[in-house]
Image: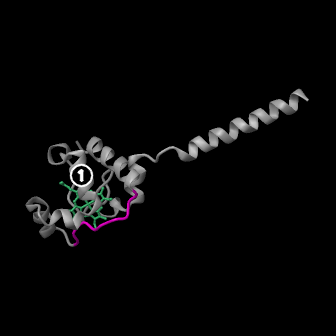
Amino acid sequence: MKHLIAIALCSILCVLILMMACSAPPNGKTVFIESGCARCHEINGTGGSQAPRLQGLQSKWTPESLEAFLTDPPAYAKDNARLLAYQKKYPTPMPRLEIAPARRKILVQYLLKRYP
Ligand code: HEC
């Protein structure tokens, strides 16, 4: 009987740990890759001929402005001379990508930390 209780408790614990692992938020790099950003932007030294190199982002963006840009890049860029100048250099302007708001927030934190 004691064994059965121990087994039951262990099973419950396992299920709880699994549930926690599955609901943990994804990390920024995963969101970056899954959102398709790496198709155009360089990451870890590969790719990047389709888009400007991400660097010095903290001097160019606040978390709020970066979030607004990522929500709708074409709309944001049309009033921004710096972004419009980039668009002359690269074949396709940054497109609007479907990113859930919670994931966009993770992305913003990641970008500002990874490319300060
Ligand atoms: C089709 C290629 C393409 C994809 C995909 C793409 N970008 Fe861009 N990105 C660009 C281009 C081109 C620009 C230059 C500005 C513009 O086009 O409006 C840019 C600009 C940026 C900037 C501003 C850089 C600066 O110097 O201020 C950031 C930040 C950025 N992209 C992040 C991302 C993130 C994050 C993703 C994924 C969600 C992404 N990009 C997906 C092409 C792309």
Residue found 72% across the figure and 38% down from its top: 12
Q: Position of residue 5 (x, y in %)?
A: 83, 31
Specify the quadrant that holds the N terminus. Answer: top right
Mark 1 residue CB less than 8 A from any atom of ligand 1:
yes
Along the line of sight, the residue nearer the viewer: 96 or 88: 96
In the image, residue 62 sits, relative to residue 81, either above or below, namely: above
How packed mark 1 is, by other alpha carbons closer than 10 Å (few <14, some 14-19, many 20 or more), is many
> What residue is at 34 percent from the left and 64 percent from the top?
39
Q: Which residue is mark 1?
A: 66
Point out residue 93 in the picture as x, y percentages from the top left corner: 21, 69
Residue 19, x across and y down, in percent: 61, 44
Region rendered in magenta = 92-100
Question: Which quadrant does ligand 1 occupy?
Answer: bottom left
Q: Quadrant of the C terminus?
A: top left
46 relative to 116 in the view: left or right: right
Place residue 84 in its image quadrant.
bottom left
